């Protein structure tokens, strides 16, 4: 077995049961071997990528029926970890009025139901903690909805960002005062507290796709001249403070960080900077870097194609210590053999799948069968056993 396919989780296991487990899984495809982040064991490496549903009709951030079904389907379908979509840490941090939020007790209680459902299906569950920054207060991306910012008089709100640099046609933001930045850190930390209180297994810090933490990382959107702008160290300071604040409060909580590892445009946050920031995040206590791209410029062309972001995850996997941090690949990974190849060739440790799981939440069951995973049968929910492949 090549060294690369022996994962940090397997290396870190000790004792007889660990050895037995390792032997049992050696014949398995890597995609369906468990992985460990700190003390959290996840049943496989095929994870549900966070995907906004814009379905909070009451506009209060509380997940109700749709979310129970949506998360339930993903967990029942066999994903190892289900990452609940971008969930705002403050009301102003919502992408749209119909986003999820995690800043009050009613939301926390409703999130606890999501955790219960995921766990009942044997899945682990994380929530992506987010602040949309200058891309907040926009229309839900749903069929029939208009584009652009929601006007203030129609349920929208003023947006904030590192600098007064607008995004495309969206309403221009106000620059956050330096005294307000500590409040952003505190909001992320408080939302992480709520996720833990709700029984979530992990959190993902959303620092990608042109939202607030990414806006601070990027020299295109961060023109500040104070301690939070300028060189890379200063641009990365807010993200690092967020990760450290969560780590200090929750020493054992697995922390994932989603980054846009390039903006696909000259002068933007790029792969070299992403590598340095990822190395810092490992020092700060991040357990997994989830490698996405783009989202901070409305015009940069993205070279979309099969597994188009995987070269970015491969670079981070090569450059960062495998025993210190796991790497996730995402983006147009649509077939079992393709996913397995990415893992076998050491380009990532886990695969996040988005749209294919919306099309078929049971896709992990099919991929487990196709790859002849030993867990293929046990992943099938008992009442569905007569329909197994
Ligand atoms: C409907 C939808 C909603 C999304 N919402 C989020 C989100 O909340 N947070 C995030 O980081 N990415 C979000 N994404 C991006 C996905 O997580 C994923 O990275 C992207 O779709 C590429 O993976 P795929 O080709 O497997 O779909 C969303 C994508 C879709 C299709």
Image: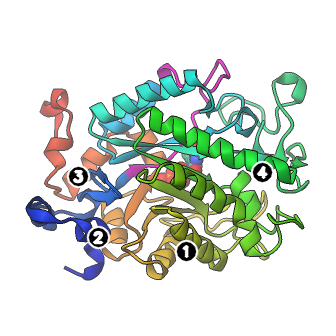
**First-in-chain label (1 vs 2):** 2
How many neighbours does mark 3 have within 10 angstroms: few (below 14), some (14-19), or many (20 or more)? many
The secondary structure type at the circle numbered 4 is: helix
Q: In the rendering, at what x and y percent does residue 202 appear?
A: 44, 47
Secondary structure found at label 2? loop
Query: Which residue occupies 42% across, 39% down?
Result: 200
Residue 173: percent from left, percent from top: 88, 46
- Does the stretch in magenta take in 59? yes
Quadrant assignment for the C terminus: top left
For marks 4 and 2, give the CA distance. Answer: 37 Å
Disc 1 versus disc 3: distance between alpha carbons? 33 Å
**Residue on which disc 2 sits:** 7
Question: Which residue is under mark 3?
Answer: 368
Q: Which residue is mark 4?
A: 181
Whichever of callouts 1 and 3 sits on the residue coming sooner in the sequence is 1
Q: Position of residue 198 (x, y in %)?
A: 45, 32
Residue range highlighted in magenta = 47-66
Which numbered disc, 1 or 3, marks the residue closer to the eye? 1
Residue found at x 66% / y 55%: 209
């Amino acid at each position: 077995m090549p060294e690369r396919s022996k994962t940090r989780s397997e290396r870190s296991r000790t004792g007889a049961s660990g050895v037995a487990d390792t032997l049992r899984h050696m014949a398995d495809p890597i995609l369906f071997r468990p992985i460990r982040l700190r003390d959290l064991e996840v049943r496989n490496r095929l994870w549900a990528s966070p995907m906004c549903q814009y379905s909070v009709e009451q506009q209060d951030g509380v997940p109700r029926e749709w979310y129970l079904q949506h998360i339930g389907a993903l967990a029942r379908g066999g994903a190892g970890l289900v990452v609940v979509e971008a969930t705002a840490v403050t009301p102003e941090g919502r992408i749209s009025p119909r986003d999820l939020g995690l800043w009050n007790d009613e939301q926390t209680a409703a999130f606890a139901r999501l955790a219960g459902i995921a766990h009942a299906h044997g899945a682990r569950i994380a929530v992506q903690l987010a602040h949309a920054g200058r891309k907040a207060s926009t229309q839900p991306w749903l069929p029939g909805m208009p584009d652009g910012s929601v006007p203030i008089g129609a349920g929208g709100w003023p947006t904030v960002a590192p600098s007064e640099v607008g995004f495309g046609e969206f309403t221009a933001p106000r620059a956050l005062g330096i005294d307000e930045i500590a409040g952003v850190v505190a909001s992320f930390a408080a939302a992480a507290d709520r996720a833990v209180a709700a029984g979530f297994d992990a959190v993902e810090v959303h620092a990608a796709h042109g939202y607030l933490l990414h806006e601070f990382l990027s020299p295109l959107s961060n023109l500040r001249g104070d301690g939070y702008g300028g060189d890379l160290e200063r641009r990365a300071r807010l993200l690092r403070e967020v990760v450290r604040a969560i780590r200090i409060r929750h020493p054992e909580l697995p922390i994932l960080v989603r980054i846009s590892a390039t903006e696909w445009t000259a002068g933007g946050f790029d792969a070299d900077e992403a590598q340095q920031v990822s190395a810092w995040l490992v020092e700060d206590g991040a357990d997994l870097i989830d490698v996405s791209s783009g989202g901070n410029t409305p015009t940069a062309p993205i070279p979309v194609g099969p597994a188009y972001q995987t070269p970015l995850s491969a670079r981070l996997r090569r450059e960062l210590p495998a025993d210190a941090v796991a790497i996730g690949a995402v983006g147009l990974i649509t077939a079992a053999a393709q996913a397995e190849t990415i893992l076998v060739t050491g380009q990532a440790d886990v695969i996040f799948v988005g749209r294919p799981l919306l099309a078929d939440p049971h896709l992990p069951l099919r991929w487990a069968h196709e790859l002849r995973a030993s867990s293929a049968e046990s992943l099938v929910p008992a009442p569905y056993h007569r329909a197994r492949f």
